[in-house]
Amino acid sequence: MSVYLTGLLWVGGAAVVAAILAYLIRKYGEIEGRSANNEAAGQVFTIVGGLHAVLVAFVLIALFDAVTQASDASYREADGLVAATWASDALSKETGEEVRELSRAYATTVMNDEWPSMTAGTDFESTGWSQLDRMRQVVAQAPATDEWQVDRKTEAANQLWQVYQARQERLDAAGGGVSSVVWFVLVAGSVLAICLPLLFGGPLMRTHVLIVATLAATIALLLYATYQLQNPFGGGAEVSPAAFEAAVARFG
């Protein structure tokens, strides 16, 4: 099922449930004193709704930043891998070929072994760290006979260190997400924000039902966005391994 269809089900289902509750409460609930509740319930709703809106906005902004950082980290990792390979080509033919093969193998491991597990949000075991460590050893043991090769060797080592850092950022982003405590607060705050308008009164039932349904649909939409963005490599965000695909193409 597509992300958009699932989102419509979330939003539509929340709107329908809230509309039914509002209708039943208005039809079978006590009418006396309902309009007098508007001022008191409205003041409480302003506080609860305001605090909830701030929390949701903070969580969504943090998730948007996490998606951007995960994408940037994958490109830094792939670009550093390519730069280290090109710098190694200046050391010796054997060193350049071995680093190139290790870089191609590492990029393939990331795409074929690591990325599907990151997309699914599951733990995985990979040879990526050992492949990077092997590249570091090859570069460190490569002979450098002149100043140009010394500079290239230093550049290759620096680029591999950047790959290490970017890889760690990518793995940290894959293991992140929204904690259970934050989800509890988000869901509880949403329920309170939707239930309080049910206490309001007014001359027209259909207007009240429409207002409650619209509020529920809006809150459900924000919660759905939070759910889809909590894993940068899956759901609605779905950061792709395009950077590593391009790196493999550069290796020839």
Image (spheres, rainbow, N blue to C red):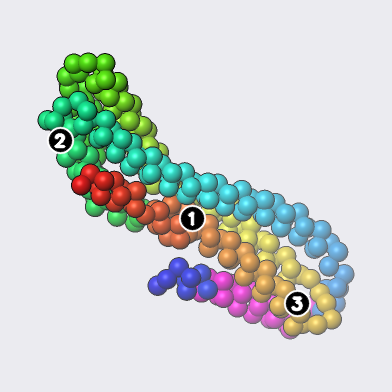
**Can I make out residue 20 in this image?**
yes
Mark positioned earlier in the residue sequence (3 or 1): 3
Main SS, magenta residues: helix
Query: How far is mark 3 from mark 1, CA to CA?
Result: 32 Å
**Residue 13 x/y as whole percent:** 55, 75
Tell me: 175 left or right of 224: left
Q: Magenta stretch containing residue 13, yes or no?
A: yes
Which is more N-terminal, label 1 or label 2?
Answer: 2
Q: In this view, does 162 lie above or below 179?
A: above
Would you place residue 193 above or below residue 163 in this image?
below
* Left or right, 209 with reference to 173: right
The residue located at (72%, 65%) in the rendering is 196
**Mark 3 residue type:** His
Checking the image for residue 97, the label placed there is 2
Q: What stretch is highlighted in magenta?
A: 9-30
Question: Which residue is label 1 attached to?
Answer: 229
Residue 37, x across and y down, in percent: 83, 67
Q: What residue type is labelled 2?
A: Glu
Q: Residue at x 83, y 67 (%)?
A: 38
Contact, mark 2 vs mark 3 (Cβ under 8 Å): no
Residue 26: x and y in percent read 74, 80
Q: Name the residue under label 3.
A: 208
